Amino acid sequence: METIPKTMRALVQLEDGYSGKSEGPVISDAALYLAEAEIPVPTPEKGQVLIKLRIASVNPSDLHFIKGEYGQPRRKGAPVGFEGCGDVVAAGKGAERLIGKRVAFAVSLGGSGAWAEYALTDAVACIPLRSDVSDVNGSAQIVNPLTAMAMVDIAAKDGDAFVISAATSQLGKLIISLAKDMNLKVIALVRRADAVTPLKAMGATEVLVTTASGFSDQFSVASRALKPRVFLDAVSDQICETVFTLMPNNARWVSYGKLGTEAPRLTQMGQLIFMGKRIEGFWLTNWMRSTPPADQARVAGEVQARFADGRWNTDVSASLRLKEVIEGLADATKLTDGKVVIIP
Amino acid sequence: METIPKTMRALVQLEDGYSGKSEGPVISDAALYLAEAEIPVPTPEKGQVLIKLRIASVNPSDLHFIKGEYGQPRRKGAPVGFEGCGDVVAAGKGAERLIGKRVAFAVSLGGSGAWAEYALTDAVACIPLRSDVSDVNGSAQIVNPLTAMAMVDIAAKDGDAFVISAATSQLGKLIISLAKDMNLKVIALVRRADAVTPLKAMGATEVLVTTASGFSDQFSVASRALKPRVFLDAVSDQICETVFTLMPNNARWVSYGKLGTEAPRLTQMGQLIFMGKRIEGFWLTNWMRSTPPADQARVAGEVQARFADGRWNTDVSASLRLKEVIEGLADATKLTDGKVVIIP
């Protein structure tokens, strides 16, 4: 087994805590928030593993976190990065079974982030990878795919049709393909007209362009025809509020992201009262806290099977080395046709 | 038994359907929406009763409805008025047991409104009155008291403290007295400083003036100390949104009215995601549809006992005859220290 070095290269936070702002997961310059540093390789405690990174992936939640707008406080000097794929090279008590395994992992609270040569997390946040799943697919197997699975499950319990925003995102595409397999109808909202044909080909029942004139009329027609009860929303802006007001009785606006930077106005509070509508949120971390481990394992196995047989695939729009992230991350995350990955 | 006339005086709608506006329950001139008319006395069908009015009461929901902003469409030419007290003078099949009884009543869908010499409603929407409950208390026994009971029940299931807005309203006072009896702590929000002393005397744990400088800091301190999980809100404006953002994890903003005319901005969508907060509504009609009859009867009995023994009382701020309503309603409903009632 190879020797573990004393220090490693990592991208670390410049700030502590929360920013108090709500600007959304867009960064103008990574150097405002992150620095490259040579820091000690962390040591796994009981139940934890040390992972030598193969590939880390960049999620909107990473950008939220870096900017101090995420659901947990920043720690100055600590490596960032919620998700990746790598090899377990050391383990604390009770986690030894994972040593030598290639795993997909999410970094849990108390861990050390994935945008580094080595990451540290709980053994329960690791999924050993089948050999027929690529490193790239392994690096993006938890945050988006589990979120997709869990949210489609919520929607499926509340009817046979639902609405999604930001439908061209990786998560959006996962949801559409999953809904198709489950015979659920999806009204997919996109910003650009060139997304309509590919998403329809992928299985979306309706694809509507939110920036088009007549959008709200088009949505209204689709809503009356398909009667969606759940709106899985990554944008949470004023257009999303309009969408919600055009949905039928007992509709649920489930926000899981804030790509939009404006604070939406609630123009129809009366619909909450008289139509039984409600507004809530979804966070994978809360889902993992509240879902039995056996159910989570079943879902994780289903996710991996989908990547292994090609039903799901991670499109890469940009690949950055650790030393390129500070300079290249802002531009790379402006690309909209796939995922940004980070390699050591 | 007295003869039932062929026609009656009633206040009827000038418009059909919804206005599409959201101005709130304030009227500048009743003549914009209502006319006095001599119309046929309705005939009770199966399960319905005809009630000779003693007193009708004016609720914010009546003003919402008259303006076309309520949860059911207006019917041009139909009498308005959701609640009152009177004597059952005729009954359809299965409702004969109520003939001759003095009842509190709410007008259900398909009925004929209370702002008239005779009203028509379902027998199940009538509560026979004990002799020790006055006509005035009988006329305001359902809409506010049942709403208070049902909402406090919601709050009580989610902790030992909650927040209410518009705390000086009749409904607010009912809620405060009920919470006191149940050993629940109430943070009461009011607009005027002169409301603080009386509401504290009534049993509110904290009474905060929303128009005072430093209000949000004061609320923040109270919220951290008492950890309220439920906000029963009749106002639903931007200050209410601020209140919601200052509440702890898993807080629920339960809107049951829209006294405020502005559309509140959701400035902290992330709290829905990361803190498990949600925004919903309460409507007594939905509660009555979804609550078993035996439970409703128990709650109604408890309500009446409270009026009978003086724990609850309806303060009257203005009393109008039917023929005075068109001219007097706008001014009467501007008074904030009690209920407006209508007598034939």
Image (tube, coloured by chain):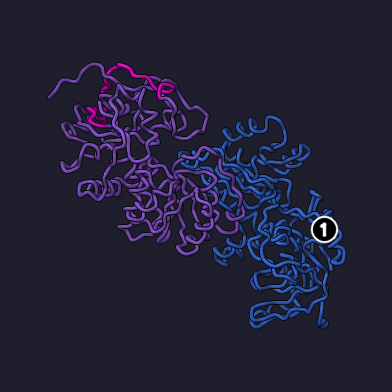
Chain colours: A blue, B purple
Identify the subunit bearing mark 1.
Answer: A
Residue A130 appears in the rendering: no
x%, y% of residue B243? Answer: 52, 52
Placement of A77 over or under B272, stated as above or below: below
Taking B253 as reference, is A83 left or right? right
Taking the spot 48% from the left edge, 39% from the top edge, the residue there is A275
Residue A199, quarter of picture = top right
Residue B52 belongs to the span the image colors magenta = yes
Residue A330 belongs to the span the image colors magenta = no
Taking the spot 67% from the left edge, 66% from the top edge, the residue there is A17
Residue A210, quarter of picture = top right
Where, quadrant-wise, is the C terminus of chain B in this rendering? top left
Give, as a single range, the part of the protein colored magenta.
B30-55
Placement of A135 over or under B253, stated as above or below: below
x%, y% of residue A156? Answer: 56, 48
Most extreme residue toward the left is B1
Taking A249 as reference, is B305 left or right? left
**Tag 1 residue:** A329
Where, quadrant-wise, is the N terminus of chain B in this rendering? top left
Residue A64 appears in the rendering: yes
Q: Secondary structure at mark 1?
A: helix
Taking A109 as reference, is B57 left or right? left
Taking A274 as reference, is A18 left or right? right
Q: What amino acid is found at the position of numbered circle 1 in the picture?
A: Leu
Taking the spot 47% from the left edge, 64% from the top edge, the residue there is B225
x%, y% of residue A224? Answer: 57, 33
| Residue A202 vs residue A325, the one in the foreground | A325
